[in-house]
Image (cartoon, helix red, strand yellow):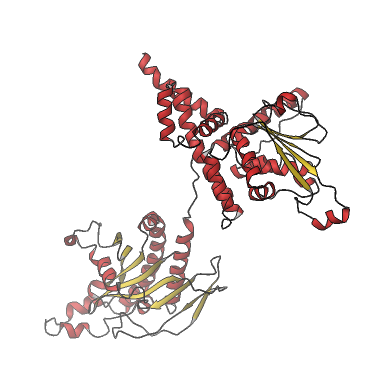
Amino acid sequence: MNALVALCHFCELHGPRTLFCTEALHPPSMCMCACCHFSCIKTHNCLSIYKPLVKGVVEFRGRRSDVSQFSLILSSRAYIGRERRVCLKSFIAHVPSQGWVCPGREGPIFFGDEQHGFVFSHTFFIKDSLARGFQRWYSIVMVAMDRIYLINSWPFLLRHLRLTIQSLQSTALKVFDSEQCVCPQRAVRMNSVFSPAVFPHQRSGNAARSLPSLTQHTKLWASLHSSFSWLLKACGSRLTEKLLEGAPTEDTLVLVERQTEQEEEMSCWEGAEGGGSRPQYHQSESELYRDFLFDEGKAEGYPGPKFRSLRHLRQVLGTTNFRQLAWHVLMGNQVILRGADPGLIHSAFTMLKALLPVGCVRSVTYSAQYEEAYRCNFLGLSPDVPIPTHVSSSEFSVLVDVVSLERGSLYSAACGEDILSLYQFNISSTNSQPTDKGPTLLNKMEVALSNENLSVDVVSHCLLCLKEEWMNKVKVLFKFSKVDGRGREDTQKVLALLGATGPGEEDNVRLLKFWMTGLSKTYKSHLMTAVRGGERPLSQ
């Protein structure tokens, strides 16, 4: 934890002073253990503040090997500029005339600001037979710049600081009782002659006593360092940041719905066969999406080269052919890949499916016969499967023939993963509409793919953000046109507000309408239920 713990004392002769402080240091080089060096710099002559110590090193081993707890007698460099202010406030905060709200002269209090840091202070008394009122005033303060973290740690700090304070008080009370048994100071003071002139001289003898002498604890500073170091470490590890991903995306909802349907179907078959029910396994969002992309066709089991990324597919096909193929994918047209290498075809579909929402993907990875467009928009065929005439003449489909080049076995072995040296890609479609204007989403995707400064992972996250942006537009358009039933003029205004008008407007509208089919059943039912619930009071 990036904080500082200090032990303060209100001296009767010198006022508030800091006796001991512990803070976490982050050295540039990694070390295997956290070391504490005790400093013995004598800067004050008051015996209540300073007592000579033996130099030594204490090791603390833990999980955070890059953090050292460093303790100093008196103050550290980071704390020296504000020690008097923090120390003084820790004591006057309990004075009613200062306007602070704290019950009694002992107990915890919180104060501070953004400039000087925030302080959690706990003031307490230690019994001393030679002190005025037979007690001395101490406080333990924790200084940190994070106000929220310090406030959230209040119960934890209060509980453990009270244990340390109670240990000091109980030890000092035993010493106080033993000294009172030998020489009761109350009777001595009552019988002594009191005069204002000699009072300062009477108080300047052995009245100033250090905390180790009050507790008769020879290793007090080492013990305090161990307590403060553990407090910093435990307080820093008890609260951790947690990434909240927010509401599930549409892809996650669709994948969960599909998984639920498969589990229900399996349970029905098992119930019909008399088998026992299997325990359900709920996958995370990343696991569901990864299974959706890669596990469908088991491409890893096929030999030969494969497409590694969407950028790799674009480099192999060429810029023009890739844009034409991606345009058909985004518009919802049927994409047919015909070739003899099922692993290559599956890897191409894996890359192309990343362009669409999960709900818009219906794929048959490799088949020995043609499947209609209403069943799949990604279709892989063996090279001898004929394409029906109504499909080859339709503008709502595109055919990619993967032709194997006639090369010798030695040449193929030498080329290895070079796809262009092994295959030729022939793209054919009767669509006459130009694909260079839109949709806007495709233009942004191509900008990301053509930027060589972006890694493959960055490009994938960029595509994911673009899909989420356009899925939000789809939700707005669905609510406006399908649920509310607005007219064409109002719908056109919404399209302009969503940025779907202008160049490529026809492609943008077509894309939005196709992506509406990918909305989850959960979202649609929730939207319809909310609308009906809002209309019910009006009908009554």
x and y percentages locating residue 408 in the rendered image: 88, 52
Q: Which image quadrant is residue 174 in?
A: bottom left
x and y percentages locating residue 193 in the rendered image: 14, 82
Q: Residue at x 45, y 75 (%)?
A: 70
Q: Quadrant of the C terminus?
A: top left
In the rendered structure, the answer to whether residue 157 lies left or right of residue 202 reads right
Q: Quadrant of the N terminus?
A: bottom left
Where 31 falls versus 297 (above or below)? below
Q: Residue furthest right?
A: 409
Q: Residue at x 45, y 60 (%)?
A: 235
| Residue 248 shows up from this direction | no
In the rendered structure, the answer to whether residue 131 lies left or right of residue 495 reads left
| Residue 525 shows up from this direction | yes
Where 107 falls versus 319 (above or below)? below
Q: Which image quadrant is residue 296 in?
A: top right
Q: Nearer the viewer, residue 351 or 338?
A: 338
Q: Nearer the viewer, residue 505 or 297?
A: 505
Q: Residue furthest top?
A: 540
Q: Residue at x 67, y 25 (%)?
A: 374
x and y percentages locating residue 464 in the rendered image: 55, 44
**What is the number of callouts on the image?**
0
In the rendered structure, the answer to whether residue 91 lies left or right of residue 346 reads left
Q: Which image quadrant is residue 103 in?
A: bottom left
